[in-house]
């Protein structure tokens, strides 16, 4: 302790100079609007640079996971490609030939902003109307559904997240085919409720939940999650089913906007069916 006081006593002139310089700087910036604006802009620039570095480091550390996802998707594509099949050597082959037409087109996009801890959560994408993204299109991730496009500008799109009570998605139990609505009322970003499942329907923990499809938003059987809890509250006509979502909606990364190529035709027919 004595040595510390001796050291401070030896540099007392330097310490006094630094203290006076700090006081002078505070008086200068507090009494001069121009200098204050310069100081604020400089601090904002430094903070922005630090945040940009942090985002770059975080994105770099996630490259292994992104590459793994891309490799898995490429493997799935190659499994579906004709080059993965060999010609049959059997002298007699039964062929069930079916004409296929493309129904869905997918627009890859990156999440540039999102919330998951609010009562109503949204996701912002870096693709918009210039890329074919329109209001009402569904958005899916590598593991499950994400939300529905709420609005779009030329280069960006706002998506109502599944973690939003305003979104009710038609889903079904993959095993039995019984359908209901996915509704976020749990307050947990990893789960949601499946409502309108009658009490006579057998629902088991671990059952897979997928989309119904046919509504022009999501393809049929797109993954949603698995049943985590099931109960039958008294006085309620349906079961209380909690679904653990497949997609991690607290992360950033790449997603796919779903364009149902038959939606316009189906919507036009339904409008003609409505009474005038």
Image: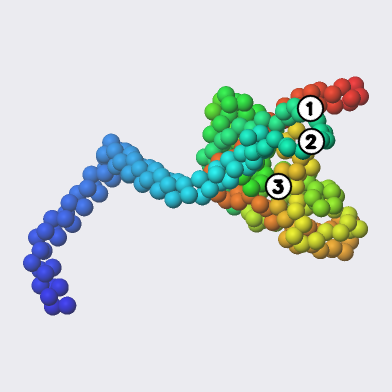
- Tell me which label, 3 or 2, sits earlier in the chain: 2
Say which of marks 1 and 2 sits in front.
2
The residue furthest bottom is 2
The mark closer to the camera, 3 or 2, is 2
162, above or below 273, in the image = below
User: Mark 1 and mark 3 in contact (Cβ < 8 Å)?
Assistant: no
Q: Which residue has dot 1 on it?
A: 99
- Rounded to the nearest whole Å, what is the CA distance between mark 3 and mark 2? 40 Å
Residue 204 spot, x, y in % from top left = 80, 61
Label 3 and label 1: CA atoms lie apart by: 26 Å
Residue 187 versus residue 110: which sits nearer the camera? Answer: 110
> Which residue in the protein does label 3 denote?
223
In primary-sequence order, the first of circles 1 and 2 is 2
Q: Is residue 123 left or right of residue 9?
A: right
The residue singled out by tag 2 in the image is 91
Which element carries disc 1, helix, strand or loop?
loop
Q: Residues within 10 Å of mark 2 (few under 14, many from 20)?
A: few
Which mark sits nearer the N-terminus, 3 or 1? 1
């Amino acid at each position: 302790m004595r040595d510390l006081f001796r050291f401070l006593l030896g540099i007392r002139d330097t310490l006094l100079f630094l203290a006076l310089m700090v006081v002078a700087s505070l008086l200068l910036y507090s009494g001069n609007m121009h200098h204050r604006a310069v100081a604020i802009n400089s601090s904002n620039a430094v903070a922005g640079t630090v945040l940009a570095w942090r985002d770059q480091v975080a994105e770099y550390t996630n490259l292994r996971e992104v590459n793994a996802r891309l490799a898995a998707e490429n493997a799935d594509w190659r499994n579906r490609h004709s080059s993965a099949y060999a010609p049959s050597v059997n002298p007699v082959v039964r062929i069930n030939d079916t004409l296929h037409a493309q129904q869905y087109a997918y627009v890859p996009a990156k999440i540039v902003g999102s919330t998951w801890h609010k009562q109503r959560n949204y996701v912002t994408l870096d693709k918009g109307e210039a890329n074919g993204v329109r209001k009402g299109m569904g958005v899916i991730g590598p593991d499950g559904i994400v939300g529905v496009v709420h609005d779009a500008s030329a280069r960006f799109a706002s998506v109502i997240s599944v973690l939003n009570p305003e979104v009710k998605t038609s889903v079904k139990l993959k095993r039995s085919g019984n359908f209901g609505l996915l509704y976020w009322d749990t307050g947990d970003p990893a789960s949601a409720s499946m409502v309108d499942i009658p009490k006579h329907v057998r629902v088991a923990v671990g059952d897979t939940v997928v989309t119904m499809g046919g509504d022009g938003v999501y393809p049929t059987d797109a993954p949603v999650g698995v049943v985590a809890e099931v109960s039958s509250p008294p006085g309620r006509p349906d079961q209380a089913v909690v679904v653990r979502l497949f997609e991690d909606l607290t992360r950033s990364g790449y997603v796919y906007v779903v364009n149902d190529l038959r939606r316009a035709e189906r919507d036009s027919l339904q409008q003609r069916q409505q009474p005038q």
